[in-house]
Image (cartoon, rainbow, N blue to C red):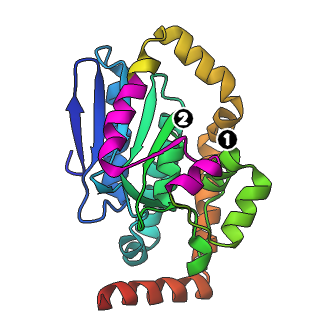
Amino acid sequence: METLQIHKKKNHAIIEIDNGKVNAINLPLLQDLNQAFAQLQADDTVKGVILAGRPNCFSAGLDIVSLAMGGVELAVPFWRAYFQLCQKMIRFSKPLVAAITGYAPAGATILALMTDYKIMARGQKHVFGMHEFKMNLQIPELLCRIYAYYSGEKNAWLAVQQAKLFHADDAVEAGLVNEAAEVEEVLPKAEAYLQKLMYVTPRVYADSKRYLTHQLWQIVDLSEARMEEMIEEHIEASNTPEAQMMVKMFVEQLKNK
C-alpha cells in the first residue's frame, strides 16, 4: 500500500497514514484504507487496531486540489470509497483506537470519529472539526450525520455554522475526542488503552459495540442505491458556480504558498 504503513505488533496492528506531506485524503488513500480494514477484520492474529498519523500530522483532510481537477469522473469513485470506508470502520468488530497525532480537520475529523476511542495531540496547529463553511463547501449528508452523532445535532449545527475548529482540550470538552495528550504521548497512550479493550472477549466486545452504537450503525446502513443517491446529491451541490469559485480561490492560494 503506497499511502499507508501497517505495523504488525504481537497482538494488534497500527495503521499509519503516510500519504505525502500533509497526509491528504485522496482516492488512493481511501482505497488503501478500505483494503486495510477488510484485511485486518479477517486476520485472526490481530485483536485490535490503532489508526495514526505522523507526529504533528494526522491528516489535513480532503485533497481539495485533486478533487477540483478531477471533476465528476474522480468525485464519484472518491465519495463511493469514502462512504464504503465509513461502513467498514463503524462496523469493525475489533477494538479500534485513533491516535490523532496532529491536525485533523474536516474529512480527517470524520476518519477519527469512526473509531471507538480517540486520543488527540495538543498543539497550536492541531485542530479538529468541520470548517467547510469557510470555503462555501457542502458537507456530505453521511458525514454530517456522523459528526452530529458525537456532539448532538444542535451543537454540531452551531459548530458547522461557525466553521469551528477545536484544539485538543476543547475537543475533549465538546465530546468529540476522549483524551488530550502531548504529541509524543499519543501513540503510547493509544496502545495502552487498546490493550485494555483487547482484554474483553472478542464476541462480547463486538456485540456490545453494536448494541451501544446502534444509531451510528443505522447512519451507515445504506443500500447501494441510497449511497449512489447521496453521492449524486453531494456532487450536484458542490458544482454550483459559488462553490466552484471558492474552490478555485482555495487552489490558487495553495499554489501561491
Residue numbers of the magenta segment: 168-194
- Residue located at (58% from left, 48% from top): 172
Q: Where 171 sits versus 73, above or below?
A: above
> Amino acid type of disc 1?
Ile
- Residue located at (48% from left, 36% from top): 89
Query: Which quarter of the rendering shows the N terminus?
Result: top left
Q: Where 185 sits versus 25, above or below?
A: above
Q: Secondary structure at mark 2?
A: helix
Q: Where 183 sits versus 46, above or below?
A: below
Q: Is residue 245 left or right of residue 208?
A: left
Answer few, some or many: residues within 10 Å of disc 1's Cα (few below 14, many 20 plus, some between 14 and 19): some
> Amino acid type of disc 2?
Ile
Q: Is residue 248 magenta?
A: no
Q: Residue 28's x, y, as percent?
A: 30, 54
Query: Which quarter of the rendering shows the C terminus?
Result: bottom left
N-term-proximal mark, 2 vs 1: 2
Instruction: Mark yes or no: residue 253 visible.
Output: yes
In this view, the residue in front, 53 or 166, is 166
In this view, the residue in front, 179 or 66, is 179
Q: Residue 230's x, y, as percent?
A: 63, 56
Q: Secondary structure at mark 1?
A: helix
- Label 2 close to label 1 by CB (< 8 Å): yes
Magenta stretch: dominant secondary structure: helix
Q: Residue 200's x, y, as percent?
A: 48, 11
Instruction: Mark yes or no: residue 38 visible.
Output: no
- Residue located at (34% from left, 30% from top): 191
Image quarter for residue 217? top right
Distance, label 2 to label 1, CA atoms, is 10 Å
Q: Residue 97's x, y, as percent?
A: 44, 34
Q: Circle 1 is placed at which residue position?
A: 219
Image quarter for residue 165? bottom right
Q: Circle 2 is placed at which residue position?
A: 90
